[in-house]
Image (cartoon, rainbow, N blue to C red):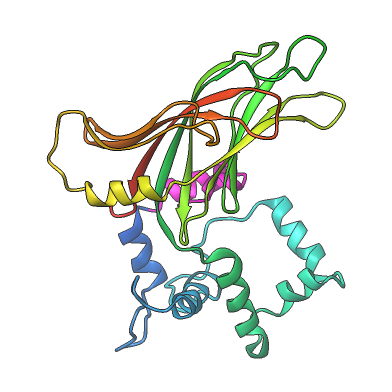
Amino acid sequence: VISVNLDEWTDEEVNCLANSGGNATVNTKYEAFLPENYKKPRQDFATEDRAIFIRKKYELQQFVTNPQFACPLHKHGAEKRHNQQHSGSKHGTFRNSWMKKESENKGVKKMMDVGMVEFVGLIKVDIIRGTDLAVRDVMSSDPYVMIILGHQSMKTKVIKNTLNPIWNERLMLSIPDPVPPLKVLVFDKDTFTSDDRMGEAEVDIQPLISAAREYQSSIITESTQICTFLASENSILAKDSIISIVGGKVEQEIALRLQNVEHGELEIKLECVPLNQ
């Protein structure tokens, strides 16, 4: 489940999922009464067809053996939905009417536009260290790093009172299709005001993805350089960046020269894992 960490889970919900028995067991319940000769959408089917099937399977629960099988909802989540259904907001109206035939297509379109994002893999981003970062407090800064890929974002811990922080922290995001640039932003954490910017950079991860796809079935065991990107005075690279195979993994080490700031560099390492891995 790609976005499971975007929500809060109760112990009851976690236990329900843990005791469900896995995909095969769950599908025997959610798909117990699929109509005969019903063509279940596969991965290569149109997004709209898959979206409609997902709604029928999980939201309408048209094929289940037991309508009460689904895991329990948050109490506060149920109250929130109740309030939305009785409010005059557009969101509440959508919640209250998605099962009606005339609004079903609108619901599917909303799911396609917002939720049904195609992913091509995962990218692991190791935030290693910052060097000579900008001062944003009296004498120093409290820096942290945020990475953004499409609509996803993650951030590191805050390192207090330093201009040369060492994070050695791994963040991981799903890679959407089409592939956007990876945005890397550095901030100074403030308690009573908005966080101050300490520079940013954009990284084109398409070459790394292409290399990962090409070498995903490779039997190369020794460290091997695939390609090199040369640093220059006008580029965001503080030094040459190399895509390599290391221990069977396709990685890229990058020293970024932060932009829109007085000075500062950030060292990161990327690893791409194609979806079929």
Which quadrant of the figure has residue 77? Answer: bottom right
Q: Nearer the viewer, residue 170 or 98?
A: 170
195 lies above or below 215: above
Residue 262 colored in magenta in the image: no
Residue 19 colored in magenta in the image: yes
Q: Position of residue 95 (x, y in %)?
A: 71, 72
- The answer to whether residue 32 is visible is yes
Q: Position of residue 39 (x, y in %)?
A: 33, 84
- The answer to whether residue 277 is visible is no
138 lies above or below 202: above
Q: Residue at x 21, y 35 (%)?
A: 248
Looking at the image, residue 134 sits to the left or right of residue 35; the answer is right
Which quadrant of the figure has residue 263? Answer: top right
Q: Residue at x 23, y 47 (%)?
A: 216
Looking at the image, residue 82 sits to the left or right of residue 270; the answer is right
Q: Residue at x 70, y 52 (%)?
A: 75
Which span of residues is magenta-colored?
A: 1-20
Which quadrant of the figure has residue 89? Answer: bottom right
Residue closest to the far front: 233
Q: Nearer the viewer, residue 277 or 245?
A: 245
Q: Position of residue 119 (x, y in %)?
A: 43, 58
Q: Nearer the viewer, residue 196 or 133?
A: 133
Looking at the image, residue 244 sits to the left or right of residue 167; the answer is left
Q: Nearer the viewer, residue 41 or 159?
A: 159
Q: Position of residue 255 (x, y in %)?
A: 48, 27
